Image (tube, rainbow, N blue to C red):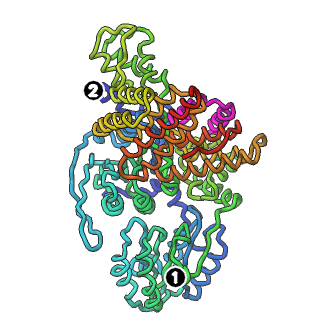
Amino acid sequence: MAPLLQSSQPWVEKYRPRRVKDVAHQDEVVRVLTNTLETTNCPHMLFYGPPGTGKTTTALAIAHQLYGPELYKSRVLELNASDERGINVVRTKIKNFAAVAVGSGHQGGYGYPCPPFKIIILDEADSMTEDAQNALRRTMETYSKVTRFFFICNYISRIIEPLASRCAKFRFKPLSEEIMSTRVLHICNEEGLNLDSEALSTLSSISQGDLRRAITFLQGAARLFGSSISSKDLISVSGVVPQEVVGDLLASCKSGSFDSANKQVNNVIAEGYPVSQILSQLFDLVVESDDVSDEQKARICRKLGESDKCLVDGADEYLQLLDACSCMIKAFCNMPEGYSN
Amino acid sequence: MLWVDKYRPKSLDKVLVHEDVAQNLKKLVTEQDCPHLLFYGPSGSGKKTLIMALLRQMFGASAEKVKVENKTWKVDAGSRTIDLELTTLSSSHHVELNPSDAGFQDRYIVQEIIKEMAKNRPIDVKGKKGFKVLVLNEVDKLSREAQHSLRRTMEKYSASCRLILCCDSSSKVTEAVRSRCLNVRISAPKEDQIVKVLEFIGKKEGLQLPPGFAARIAEKSGRSLRRAILSFETCRVQQYPFTNNQVIPPMDWEEYVSEIAADIMKEQSPKRLFQVRGKLYELLVNCIPPEVILKRLLHELLKKLDSELKHEVCHWAAYYEHSMRLGQKAIFHIEAFVAKFMSIYKGFLIATFG
């Protein structure tokens, strides 16, 4: 087989924290889990929070630390959305794994005693069907002596209440700018990159608390532009639309001419900018602008929301953006709202 | 061979448009660690060309020796097994597939087939790359579940496999997938860039181009390079040597749509609506995508309208396109739009002229 190259790994994997105490910014979880490591006892856990805050990393780190590399394979079952997780899998695979008893007394990884239970990590649990979640309820209780469940999800509202109430819940916070900066600077040092303070603050603002995104952008920029990275380079790899484009679009809407707005929209589509991103940047601009009355803002924001929903449903980008712009023109010119059905 | 294929640039150095992107990509692959890539941009802007050139840059000429395989996969989905037919295009270093072809069963493709492919490390010892490449087309058409399934696969097997995703609009790709990729935006080529390419082809073919001829083709193409080259070739077949006043033939379906638009403007009645239905069916059975028809129809109608009406008409176009996406049969929604337009226009005519 071809050699496995360490250097070919994405930095997100390369710098993934291997130990629980290295996980940034999630103090409560880290404290509880460090306690677990010492006492070898823990409840079922439910981690939730936005992407890129370290949920999967934490779960994998604790599993590795508890069991060490040898026992890991036999004691941990990791299932994520890339695995089939219908009700059948819950009834057979998970149940069978959960039912197996384990002996204690082994020496675990990193000198901690090995706990007398196994761990099942269900990543991206919010994409499991409700039926599959229901089927888990009794399983969790019956085998609670020998098995612990770790649920990981973005939206806690998609986890059914009976499951959530059986777990200790931990919310993972979006990373603050300082923590993000220290992490990014650490990677820059390791990789020999040069990042000025302006680029650093741009990086934290475009990644919006998502460390994984920040690191991916950083790696992309480093590959494309070499070892010294400016904030402009970061914007060009991040897919954020340049402010002038959105500004032009807004200006043409304010001028009140439908045709010039239509031309701008055509231009935006041809340039290939993602419309959902344009809508969110338009929203920022409109909310912050001073020369727009509150009523106009409210009208525009409502329309932007509707268009965004339509985009999520898969509607055409051009038509939705044009509709949003036409609504903005009408709002700026104080034309009456709405159409009769 | 069509000119579109004949003059497709084979390597990153020979790319005529998007030179900056091509240079960046070249830098990207000369280093060992290439991230996952997501190419997005309108159709006809050169995404596929760049991907193929990139693969060639990575693996050398052997990436071009592709074979088409039509394989049936048996996927075990709990109580029953599903047969999935999938066409793949593969060389010894990369596999290209179109997962959204499987429709609502695309989840199984991602969960079983792509995972299976991603898991296996390349056998080739001589090749210096320690990974292989999976090219996935039309990821924006993947269902939400399938995109979720892709997330962890991208991370877990990143040591042995790189994904190159390709789509028209990145709005429809979930945030989670986008944040795992290096996003590469491919904009539609500008008109002067198209002119440059056309002149290049003209020179290679030994053609005499009258001044301004290429610019006219470029203007008609709507910034799609593929379309420009195709209509250039059509012109060549129609009449050579080129003359300055030669008509550049529009697409026949576009002509048809503008005919429909003219019909609608002329008369607004149930009878006319019925006639229009027949024409719309004609377009649909010829496999013109319904949203393209609707967009073109709106474009034609907007040309002929007062500015007050434009707002309302474009609102309803967006409304019916959205409901078309949620619904099943496209003809209902296009026809609803036509009927709506007729009622608006008639109301406007009555209000103005009595």
Looking at the rendered structure, the kind of residue marked 2 is Leu
* Pointer 2 residue: B2
* Pointer 1 residue: A162
Q: Residue at x 58, y 88 (%)?
A: A39
Residue B284 vertical placement versus A197 (above, below): above
In-image side of B77 versus B50 (left or right) = left
Looking at the rendered structure, the kind of residue marked 1 is Pro
Front-most of residues B205 and A197: B205
Residue B165 vertical placement versus B296 (above, below): below
Residue B70 vertical placement versus B252 (above, below): below
* Measured Cα–Cα span from mark 2 to mark 1: 62 Å
Q: Secondary structure at mark 2?
A: loop
In-image side of A192 versus B293 (left or right) = right
Q: Residues within 10 Å of mark 1 (few under 14, many from 20)?
A: few
In-image side of A115 versus A77 (left or right) = right
Can residue A189 be spotted in the picture?
yes
Residue A174 vertical placement versus A335 (above, below): below
Specify whether residue A148 is painted magenta.
Answer: no
The numbered disc on residue B292 is: none
For this orientation, the residue located farthest to the front is B354
Q: Nearer the viewer, mark 2 or mark 1?
A: 1
| Span of residues in magenta | A242-270
Q: Is disc 2 in the same subunit as disc 1?
A: no
Q: Residues within 10 Å of mark 2 (few under 14, many from 20)?
A: few
Q: Chain of mark 2?
A: B
Specify whether residue A257 is painted magenta.
Answer: yes
Front-most of residues A33 and B331: B331
Residue B118 is drawn in which quadrant? bottom left
Where does the image place residue B275, in percent across and percent down from the top left? 33, 34
